[in-house]
Image (cartoon, coloured by chain):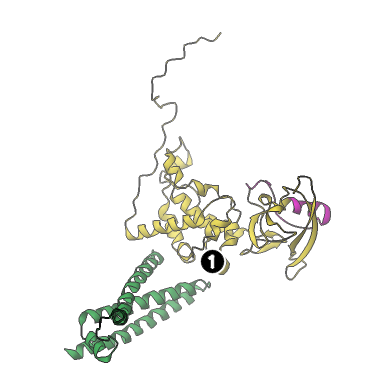
Chain colours: A green, B yellow
Amino acid sequence: MKNTYLQISQMITGALVAVLLAIHITVQQWFVVLGLLGIKVADPTTWGSMMERAHQGSWVGIYIALLAFGLFHALNGFRNILLEINLSALAIRILTGFIIAFGVIFLILGTYAPIALFSSYR
Amino acid sequence: MNNDAVKKITFRVQRFDPEKDRKPHFQEFTVPVKRGTTVMEGLLYIKENLDSSLAFRTSCRMGVCGSCGMLINEYPHLACHTQVEEFHSDKLTLKPLPNMAIIKDLVPKLDTLFEHHKSVKPYIIREDKEEMEKPTAGYLQKPQQLDEYLQFTYCIKCGLCIAACPTSASDKAFLGPQALGQAYRYCADSRDEGQDFRYAIVEKDHAVWNCHFAAACSEACPKGVDPALGIQLLRKGVAAKALGIKKTAAPATLATPPALAKPKIDVPEFTVEPK
């Protein structure tokens, strides 16, 4: 049932990425929308505002989750496309290993920054 | 068009003889057609009157056997089930079904179709092996249970769905809509107990999860079967099984042999004496 579990995970991560991305985009742009309505709020894209969010555990969690789900969804989807070109079993194993390694490295690199920022605040 | 009016139509036929040709080429034939003439009748006219070396498959001539699948004006059709008039054109281009090797002219190699079909175990699997070997009665099935898979039994294995499928075109190892549709047909049969065997087969690479749901298979099917629906329902079943939320009903039971069955109402004895 490996392929089925991967496909179910692909669907779930796709939905989660959509939700988390919607939160991210809304937060980045909502001040523009509110500004059009005449309500003045602080610009969330300034350095200070970003640092403020980086020091909140909930935002660190959201960004790490977005990175993890996004990486899984993108790399598993990329693997699915490549599998359609009739590769040998060995080539599939090598490709899968390479994709997993790529994902893990980028997950570590990507989580380092928010965790380091969050830790420095404490 | 008047019933008796004869019109000249050009049949542009792809020819390929593996013993002589390096690659396929086209040959044109002028065929007289009238209202109701099918593409198959046009091909038979060519074979009988113009070029007896033209190769194509034909058998029932009434859309039942599935032998005469071919590309007509770049779309898969059964030649015996398609009238020339439908195309509103003076020229028809005929090619063998794509996504399959060519044996000769319009004859595709259907080996892969049948191998894939066979691989999904297209038959009733029961745990009561003795009954399967030496059947004593039929299995009971409600009309509602029959409706679950009835349309999929209409498949005639013509290969038009595979010819129309974009995934089959790009992934030669893909099981294809025909085999996957038939896998669903048997999984949905209340008499069957082979779901686990089939789920394990269709769950592998190049199978149920590789369908892109273009639904071109369902559009091309000359028998009105909807393989794309079957694939989606098969996915639902495989996913439910993997998540442990699949509802499993007890398999159909054996029907009581008629001789032992009690009538629902009291039937009077036959009392008229023969003369």
Chain of the residue on which disc 1 is drawn: B
Image spot of residue B215 (x, y percent): 52, 60
* Residue B119 visible somewhere in the drawing: no
Image spot of residue B199 (x, y percent): 42, 57
Image spot of residue B195 (x, y percent): 41, 53
Q: With respect to residue B33, does A101 lie above or below? A: below
Residue lying farthest top? B275
Disc 1 residue type?
Thr
Q: With respect to residue B239, does B255 lie above or below? A: above
Q: Hey, which quadrant is residue A24 in on the image?
A: bottom left
Does B168 lie within the magenta span? no
Segment tinted magenta in the rendering: B41-64
Q: Check disc 1 and report the residue beneath it.
A: B167
Q: With respect to residue B107, does A97 lie above or below? A: below
Nearest the eye: A46 or A24: A46
Residue lying farthest front? A38
Q: Hey, which quadrant is residue A109 in on the image?
A: bottom left
Q: Residues within 10 Å of mark 1 (few under 14, many from 20)?
A: many
Nearest the eye: B117 or B94: B94
- Give the mark count: 1
Q: Mark 1 falls on what kind of element?
A: helix
Q: With respect to residue A15, does B156 lie above or below? A: above
Q: Quadrant of the C terminus of chain B?
A: top right
- In the picture, measured across the screen, residue A19 lies left or right of residue B111, that is left
- In the picture, measured across the screen, residue B241 lies left or right of residue B154, that is left
* Residue A99 visible somewhere in the drawing: yes
- In the picture, measured across the screen, residue B192 lies left or right of residue B178, that is left
Q: Hey, which quadrant is residue A77 in on the image?
A: bottom left
Does B59 lie within the magenta span? yes
Image spot of residue B184 (x, y percent): 46, 53
Residue lying farthest right? B49
- Which residue lies at the image location 68% right of the left edge and 50% below the top edge? B80
